[in-house]
Image (cartoon, helix red, strand yellow):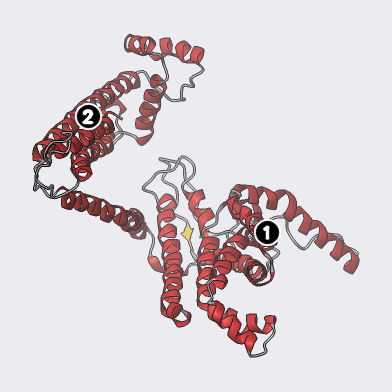
Amino acid sequence: MIIVLIGLAGWIAGARRASAFAGREAVGGPRGPKLHSRATYHGAFVFCLAVVPALVLLLVGLAAAPGYVAADVHNHFPASALDADGKVPPLSYELVNQLGRNLDLLPPDERAAASAMTLADLGPVFQRRGIPLAGGTEDYMLPLALRADELSSTLRLGLAGVTIVLAAAGALFGLSRIAVRFRARNNVEFIVRSLLILCSLVAILTTVGIICSMLFEAIEFFRHVSPQSFFFGTVWDPRFAAAGSGGASGQFGLIPLLAGTLYIAAVAMLFAVPTGLLAAVYMAEYADRRVRSVVKPLLEVLAGIPTIVYGFFALITVGPFLRDISAEIAGLATGDYAPFIQGQSILTAGLVMGVMLIPFVSSLSDDIITAVPRSLRDGSLGLGATRSETIKKVVLPAALPGIVSAILLTASRAIGETMIVVLAAGVAARLTINPFEAMTTVTVKIVNQLTGDLEFNSPQTLVAFALGITLFAITLLLNIFALYIVRKYREQYE
């Protein structure tokens, strides 16, 4: 806030200084020389010099400070707390961080007094304040937590002071640059253009960061497990091992997980695509304005429901309903009321996921159908075609590329779903073609492999990154193919 206030003050001062150079503040006085840029551009130039460098330094400092604090805390760990390799155990460092966060919740006087206490003395203080103390916390962690807290506070104050000084220096430098022929507009436009380019690079850099964060860990996984056994294996048995136990590596066959992912997504798309497409046709071609204004928002409300709620709906309502219906059908046919549809099954997950995907298909398809030129409809109707014939033979073929791309984008959304599958299809990794049985997906196993107290360098954990990079590649190819179809056929009907 102080940096922004300095920038605003610089803006006002810069604009007034530029106006004074032009003689525009003298009432009735002679006009001065003409400015190259308007006074507001001079003010904006001062604002940019005051705010942009200071904020960049602030962000870089806030990003680098935790790393510096972590390195300092690692260097002050006692030798007795290190593992056999002379390294700090990750759990011990996390306990120090947790203790530091707990200390931050204390009032300043009690936090200052904590430096002279032990954990036994500090326990009642935490209990009185309702602050939990993590199990496994030891006495040597308290000085480390206090040191980390003090160092973080010092860095924050120092960073705040430096950035404020930099903002003031930038404002003064900007004011000193103001002159009659100074090209303030050109400089402001260059700064704004640079910021726009930086913002446009965020998506690219994020994608590169996602790929790199998964790729290097996946390469480490493939040093333990051969790519052939991973990509072509048909058995998923990771054999979880607790941290430090050095358990067996297990079998990491991708085929059951990939089959479950594609199977459940296919069932969901079989339900979502016809329903969503027909809803889009109705809203775009048949519904009047009043009906459309009600139906379209209500349909799109489904897109705002959290996926965990859909999972609860599948677990409590849809799954038991299908199980009971199958039991009644089996009883009428054979006299044995044993259900042939499990409560957690591919069909349950596919149906509920399909309901979740309907707004994506309908909304995208509705926009695409509405964008078809009116002249195509009028030409078809003018030649004697009925409305239904016009929709089937003119409108839908014209909108087909966009509809296909919408379906592919929806498919990538279905492939990445997790919570509905966990609650509606279970976690059993198996190969089956029976939609009434349970299967699981890649995303579910990624969550399973990264849950619990596991070593981060074991195949059981590293396999999550191999699964993630595989799923990323599949969804990326679907998105690229969808964009290719849109760009290839977009100009045909414009």
- Judge left or right: residue 337 versus residue 357: right
Q: Amino acid at mark 1?
A: Val
Residue 159: mark: 2
Residue 135: mark: none
Residue 346 percent coordinates (x, y): 65, 62
**Which residue is nearer to you in this view: 239 or 158?**
158
Q: Amino acid at mark 2?
A: Leu
Secondary structure of residue under mark 2: helix
> Considering only vertical position in the picture, is 66 above or below 421?
above
Residue 254 percent coordinates (x, y): 48, 64
Query: Are dots 1 and 2 in contact, CB under 8 Å?
Result: no
- The image quarter containing residue 150 is top left
Q: CA distance from mark 1 to mark 2?
A: 53 Å
Is residue 207 visible in the rendered structure shown here?
A: yes
Residue 187 percent coordinates (x, y): 16, 50
**Which residue is nearer to you in this view: 208 or 315?**
208
Residue position marked by numbered label 1 in the rendering: 295
> Considering only vertical position in the picture, is 148 above or below 30?
above
Is residue 345 visible in the rendered structure shown here?
A: no
